[in-house]
Amino acid sequence: MPTETKIGFIGAGQMAEALARGFINQNMVEAEHVFCTDPVEARKEVFRSFGTVPVDGNIAVAEAAEVIFIAVKPQYVPVVLREISPKLTEKHLIVSIAAGVTLAVLTEAAGPKAKIIRVMPNTPCLVGETAAAMCLGHGAGSADADLLQRLFESVGRIFRVDEKLLSAVTGLSGSGPAYIFLVIEALSDGGVRAGLPRDVAQALAAQTVLGSAKLVLETGKHPGALKDMVTSPAGTTIAGVHELEKAGIRAAFMNAVTAASARADELAE
Ligand SMILES: NC(=O)C1=CN([C@@H]2O[C@H](COP(=O)(O)OP(=O)(O)OC[C@H]3O[C@@H](n4cnc5c(N)ncnc54)[C@H](O)[C@@H]3O)[C@@H](O)[C@H]2O)C=CC1
Ligand SMILES: O=C(O)[C@@H]1CCC=N1
């Protein structure tokens, strides 16, 4: 059932669009109860194209919505919150999706009245498969957490974490779709290298990632055990796995998550 809560997005960019479309597609909110603003008119047009209500200026979003997603780049978050803070009341829930911007910074900029929650989502919310985590800040209680839980469970999975782990979430699942898009692109290139048409290679690569992820999530088996189910003795798979191990693929992915998490911590400084 759509929530009657009015939702606003300050910043109508890629992540805001993925969230707004996801919530609407999953019937969690009526499009006419979704408000947004953005200095780039074309972004407002995109939001208008799927039935939401672009308004002029960030204060207008605070006046129209109770749940306000702060979806600007991290460096702009404090100035945006200071701009709208005179309009914020105890009924407002500020949901920051900005990498690295801490609850302390959010609370200082938003002022003493608004409730604050940080969420780190990712772009597969657009297709109902986000991996997200949240941590509660100033004034946010169980009702606020439950509302966000319902919203995000409609577009994937969300976990509660301590704020000190949110940079790890950012580096793993926030940035993670980009790592997997690289994997899909590289697997597709391997397929083309072996003679497959690009469209077939890309579809096979993406479906292999999707199916493998579903096997992990739905069987609960360890990825290593599932890998061992594929690697026939002296077969094709172990030859491929050996090449990946020689290339240090495990360390490469660990390093990617570590670097992205560290960057999130830098953004917090
Ligand atoms: N793109 C992603 O996959 C994810 C992004 N995030 C976070 O979401 C936030 C937005 O990221 P993206 O959507 O990728 O960026 P984006 O650049 O696509 O969107 C940001 C939007 O904010 C607008 N904007 C800039 N200054 C503004 C202001 N003063 N008031 C209102 N709007 C303003 C820009 O015109 C732009 O359209 C960032 O803080 C990022 O860390 C979090 C998780 C995933
Ligand atoms: O790259 C970024 O900074 C944002 C945060 C997580 C995904 N995209």
Image (cartoon, rainbow, N blue to C red):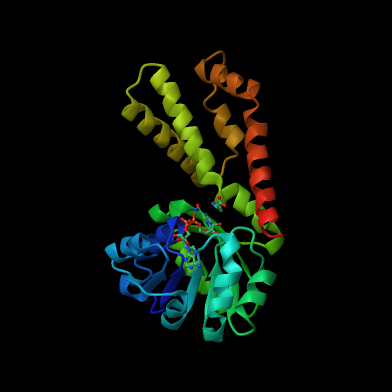
102 or 221: which is nearer to us?
A: 102
Residue at 34%, 26% (x, y): give it.
Answer: 198
Query: In the visual, does 92 lie left or right of 191?
Result: right
- The image position of residue 142, as x and y in percent, is 58, 77
- Give the mark count: 0
The answer to whether 135 is drawn above or below residue 196 in the figure is: below
192 or 233: which is nearer to us?
A: 192
- The image position of residue 102, as x and y in percent, is 67, 65
Residue 32 occupies quadrant:
bottom left
Residue at 46%, 57% (x, y): give it.
Answer: 15
Residue 212 appearing in the image: no
The answer to whether 228 is drawn above or below residue 141 in the figure is: above
Residue at 32%, 23% (x, y): give it.
Answer: 197
65 or 86: which is nearer to us?
A: 86
Residue 8 occupies quadrant:
bottom left
Quadrant (top left/top right/bottom left/bottom right) for the N terminus: bottom left
Quadrant (top left/top right/bottom left/bottom right) for the C terminus: bottom right
- The image position of residue 43, as x and y in percent, is 37, 61
Residue 188 occupies quadrant:
top left
- The image position of residue 69, as x and y in percent, is 49, 69
Query: In the visual, does 263 lie left or right of 56?
Result: right
The answer to whether 135 is drawn above or below residue 56 in the figure is: above
Query: In the visual, does 123 lie left or right of 42?
Result: right
Residue 158 appearing in the image: yes
